[in-house]
Image (spheres, grey):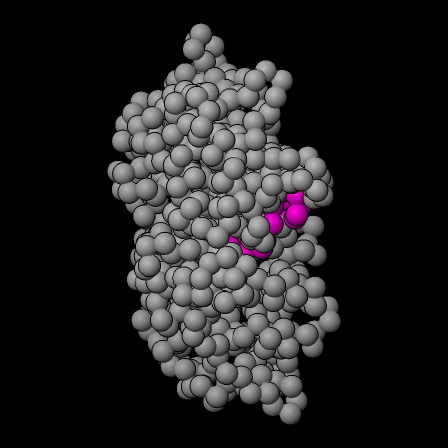
Amino acid sequence: MTEPIEWLPDGTPYSPRFGDRYHSENGGLTQARRVFLHGCGLPEAWAGQSQWRILETGFGFGLNFLVTWAAWRADPKRPTLLHFVSTEAWPVSAADLLRATSVHPELAPLAEALHRQWWGLLPGVHRLRFDEGRVLLTLYVGDTQAMLRQQNLTVDSIYLDGFSPQRNPESWDLHTLKAVARSCRRGTQLATWTIARAVRDALAQCGFEVTRVPGVPPKRDNLHATFNPRWEPRTPRQPGATPEPSLPGPCIVIGGGIAGAAAAASLARRGWQVTVLDQAAEPAAGASALPAGVFAPHVSPDDSVLSRLSRSGIRSTLEQARWLLNEGVDWAYCGVLEHRTDGSPGLSPEWTQGPGAAWSEPAPPAALAAAQLPPDATACWHHQAGWVRPARLARALLGQPGIQWRGNCAVAQLRRVETPATTHSPDIATWQVIDAHGQVLAEAPTVVIAAGAGSAALLNHRWPLQPVRGQVSWGVHADPATLLLPLIPFPANGNGNLVPRFPMGDQADGDQGWVMGSTFERDVQALPPSTADIHTAHATNWAKLQGLLPGITPQLEPLFTQALAMSAPQPAPGESPALRTWAAVRCTAHDRLPLVGPVDAVHLPGLWASTAMGARGLTLALLCGELLAARVQGEPLPLDAKLARALGTERL
């Protein structure tokens, strides 16, 4: 449940839990600007920086974030990237959030943008993205001390906020402030409104130099502190043996599918000059050439690692699709029905009692009826889900400023070249990307391998990546009056998945297609598939469709029956098949999770990987791109640190 709020006669929000106002009686806007923003020397301190990282303890209604975001927008010298990390144990409702911020008209557009993303805030880490991913709000939903110890981040400014030390002492005690101090670099500035002696003493004990500064009426004084301990502070490293953070510069990404495009876009947004190399002439020529695919969260009664990862991935996919794609043509945010054909519930009974209901819930009777499933069918309805045309997404990502596409560049090997130090310059290490003829295609200090099934060879098979061929069955017809399409108004998944209708071209009302799949043929790499393989794939996909949506199978049965009856299910020259096939080879790691991180931080510095997406590229690839960029630059992670470790290359 969301946090209950009472509203005082003057319109100030009040917390019954803590018996305290959410901000001073003179209004939160002045406090946000003078105590926190200006108290940390902003915006002057961030001028010309590639990124600026702010930590806030106690998000409340987000006024400090909105004021900081507005200042970033208004500053011509703003940093390329603004990170705002905030802890909040008790998130308010979206309606209360909007009500509290609507009294400040100058912040209204920003408040409405925040309100649109304020959903599904389960305990854990949530990354919200604004201004095309250049303003990143990372919410730690949970206890401040526990979340900071877990995430192990480094920040440049700290807004020490929250209810008064008398009302909420745990947020101000020594243990919490030690966790805050561990998030600092030497020189990190801290600002707060309280001058309580216990807080001043604890900050000094944690390595801060504390001073009083003129306060915001009715308070006479506020506190300012600089982290400058007498000891050498430890440098957080997260996760594993991550190299020292890198500043934006030249970078090469190998692979022009979803994984490579996502990594390239995330780096380019941060100011990197990215060259993308691919052996194909055009982007998304491999597994990302799938006609259309489903993105949806994974669910499990114990909320497994994959379930939590998928939710972080869905947020990233949804937000970037909204920036980049044409809804109704390139993608649709329409929800997905998951038919649990094995009868397992998927969701725990408590799931629908809180913010989890914004993600998924037991399928309502109307959805079951629309899918022609019986009322007692075990199914989930995923609200934050839909379909996307992967090639459109990859091309849109690669079209971002700062990215150069180079097709017909087949990479055969990588070579590290070191230039010895001189009296005027230090050692310089560069990676050369070389083709089969020994020609250098490109070189840069940083290279990202994101070549899907081709990654294993580029990595000299140092990791046990398994190739998996997948084949889908699909159809298309140009005449809507005679179009044979599944009669279901939304995608469905379970054992297989179906996208029932998607445009084939650039118009929502043009030629329409449908796609059903997919096969999972482990250790099979042959392309194109043989006639016998195509026949087997159609049989497999037909069996999956019969189990997934038995009510609509009569409509598609003629197509599959005809294809399966043919000895060679390919059309005569000049004809199009009624039932088509599409095949590609993906790759997976042993635990079926992607690999994101340095290849070998010690012996191969500057070489990174984002690969092994398997069948979950549409759900996880964009998150993996953000995770990779965060690790390269030493940023706050976009997801729970435990989940980042689950994706990390160090696990191998």
Residue 635 in picture, x, y percent from top left: 45, 49
Could you tell me if residue 360 is visible in this image? no
Residue at 61% x, 63% y: name it: 116
Q: Which residue lies furthest to the bottom in this view?
A: 9
- Front-most of 537 and 453? 537
Residue at 64% x, 80% y: name it: 27
Residue 384 in picture, x, y percent from top left: 52, 57
Residue 13 in picture, x, y percent from top left: 58, 83
- Front-most of 409 and 553? 553
Residue 648 figure quarter:
top left
Residue 45 figure quarter:
bottom right
Does residue 289 sit above or below 631 in this rendering? above
Does residue 471 sit above or below 214 in this rendering? above
Is residue 329 found inside the magenta-colored segment of the image? yes
Residue at 60% x, 60% y: name it: 42
Q: Name the image quarter holding the N terminus.
A: bottom left
**63 lies left or right of 171:** right
Q: Give the range drawn in magenta.
A: 323-336
Is residue 443 found inside the magenta-colored segment of the image? no
Residue 512 figure quarter:
top right
Q: Name the image quarter holding the C terminus.
A: top left
- Front-most of 609 and 529? 529
